[in-house]
Amino acid sequence: MDLIGIYLKEAFENAGCPVCNILEKYERNEISTILYEHVNNPSVREEFKKSLGLCPYHAWKLKEIAYSEPLLGSLGVAVIYDHMLSVYIESLEQKQNIRVSKCFLCERTEEKERNVISGISKRIEELMPVYQNSEAILCKKHYEMLLDELRKKKPAYADKLTELQIEKLRRIRERVERFIDKFDYRSTEAPTKKEADAVVLAIESLKGLPLQVNFSETPRKPRLRGGIFGSRT
Ligand SMILES: [Zn+2]
Ligand SMILES: [Zn+2]
């Protein structure tokens, strides 16, 4: 397997959605690099200016990461947002409506998301057996993205993925149900860690990790046939 394959395989060996996990790490690395190296970089400053200091999600994520890493601390955040305030104040003074464009971290993460999905699709032969035997569970959004890609590029694997997805979701559900049963007064056992973890996996399998790419998902409209109430013919 090539280097990207090894990196993807690793994500498929861990619990949770492999795509969400890769994106979470990617986002954290991007933000740390900016804070470590690029706070005073004019082109990065320009990127911040376009969105007036990122989208709300990434602004707070940047603050959280900076404050949680002792070597980073609050200085970088102060420098960035001092600049953003000056831009905002100037626009108010000049009675100009400031146009806020899309946050560049959102753009980068979305691009990464597309690349990861296409990378998985290209190596699906090797990754599917890993997926089958691990605690990984593609979240609904990333399962659908991968399925679309497979239908276009590797149709033979699309149905296999669906079968596997159902099998894995059923296994998670069984564990969640065992967890619930342990709360019955007749039960003499405490829930196991695996059962407790399944509750988190249940949320993750439906909603993915709390990332901007998942918050901004626009639900697909159901295809209606024969008017609002559908046709039975
Ligand atoms: Zn996901
Ligand atoms: Zn953003």
Image (cartoon, grey):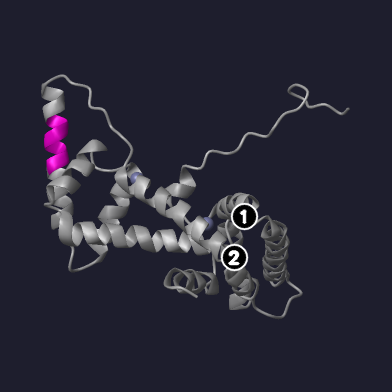
* Residue 6 visible, this orientation: yes
Per the rendered image, the range of residues in magenta is 83-89
Residue 8 appears left or right of 130: left
Q: Tag on residue 150?
A: 1
Q: Nearer the viewer, residue 224 or 66?
A: 224
Q: Does the magenta stretch mainly form a helix, a strand or a loop?
A: helix
Residue 19 percent across, percent down from the top left: 49, 60
Residue 137 percent across, percent down from the top left: 59, 64
Disc with the residue nearer the chain's start (1 vs 2): 2
Q: Tag on residue 124?
A: 2
Residue 192 appears left or right of 53: right
Residue at image position (51%, 56%) is 118
Residue 56 percent across, percent down from the top left: 33, 43
As helix, strand or loop, the secondary structure at mark 2 comes to helix
As helix, strand or loop, the secondary structure at mark 1 comes to helix
Residue 121 falls inside the magenta stretch: no
Say which amino acid is labelled 2: Ile
Q: CA distance from mark 1 to mark 2?
A: 9 Å
Check if mark 1's residue and mark 2's residue have beta carbons within 8 Å.
yes
Q: Quadrant of residue 203?
A: bottom right
Q: Tag on residue 60?
A: none
Residue 173 percent across, percent down from the top left: 70, 64
Mark 2 C-beta closer than 8 Å to ligand 1 = no
